Amino acid sequence: MRPRNIRLKPFWQQMHRSVHERAILALAKTSSVPFGKRRKAAFYRDSSMAKTRGYSYSHAMMDDSVHASRQSLTGLLFVIFLRIVATACLVMGLQFWSLLIGYSGNGLGRFDLLSVPWRLAASSLSVIFPVAAVGLWMAASWGAVVWLIAALIQCTMYGIWSRIFGSEPLLLVFHALVALVYLAFQLVLMQQRHSKASAALRNDLL
């Protein structure tokens, strides 16, 4: 049995005291260095870190501006080509919309007057062509995919099912030329990217 005049402190008070004592010891160790020197060292450390971060940020911004300004002539012509095709897609989409609402064709191409194949084809192309125009104008990769879907639909309409939709040879030639020019641009751009990557690898090795 323990004496009645001795009181044991609770566990949390002992833990608080031990943590407090460790903090006092750590402060006593750091207090051996003068406060002015510690503050000066911290200032130089923070300033050097700030300079390093500022240099890296400005260097990254400079690299971005240099890469943005080094667009090749082929890339510029490719963007112009895509925007020309985007304008053509927008015009074709508006033509289908004017057909469906009865504005063109003396109202004979209105949606409720069309046959079922024409309803499906015209309503689909009236949505697909404007979406393809937006994607091509932005030079996005999905724009070419959407245009390809619209071109395949029209080639099927006027090529395979010409008895239902009629014949449009000029439109088929237009889609074929657009596809060939697009593939040619892609091949040239791929070759340029490969040559730049090879040159950068040689510079790194040297």
Image: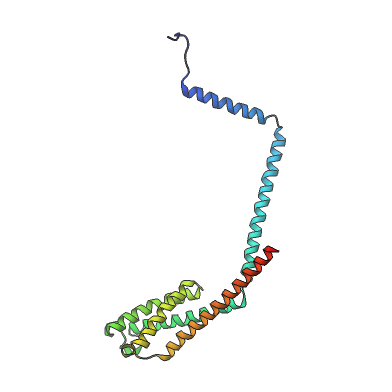
Instruction: Please indicate, yes or no, whether residue 77 appears anywhere in the rendered image.
Output: yes
Q: Is 117 displayed left or right of 89 in the figure?
A: left
Which quadrant: the C terminus? bottom right
Q: What colour scheme does the image use?
A: rainbow
Q: Is residue 10 above or below residue 124?
A: above
Whether residue 170 sits left or right of residue 63 in the image: it is left
Residue 114 % position (x, y): 28, 85
Q: Whole-percent x and y of residue 107?
A: 31, 87
Front-most of 173 and 133?
173
- Total number of numbered labels? 0
Rendered location of residue 21, percent (x, y): 58, 25
Q: Is residue 71 left or right of residue 159?
A: right
Which residue sits at x=62%, y=72%? Answer: 195
Answer with the quarter of the image where residue 198 lies.
bottom right
Q: Nearer the viewer, residue 31 or 157?
A: 157
Residue 63 drawn above or below residue 76: above
* Residue visible at 49% across and 85% down in the picture: 177
Residue 87 or residue 66, whichever sits in front: 66
Quarter of the image with the N terminus in it: top left
Asked whether residue 93 is in view, the answer is: no
**Residue 29 screen position, x and y as percent:** 66, 29
Residue at 70%, 29% in the rendered image: 32
**Res 184 → quadrant:** bottom right
Nearer-the-camera pick, 198 or 144? 198
| In the image: residue 113, left or right of residue 186 | left
Image point (62%, 78%), residue name: 73
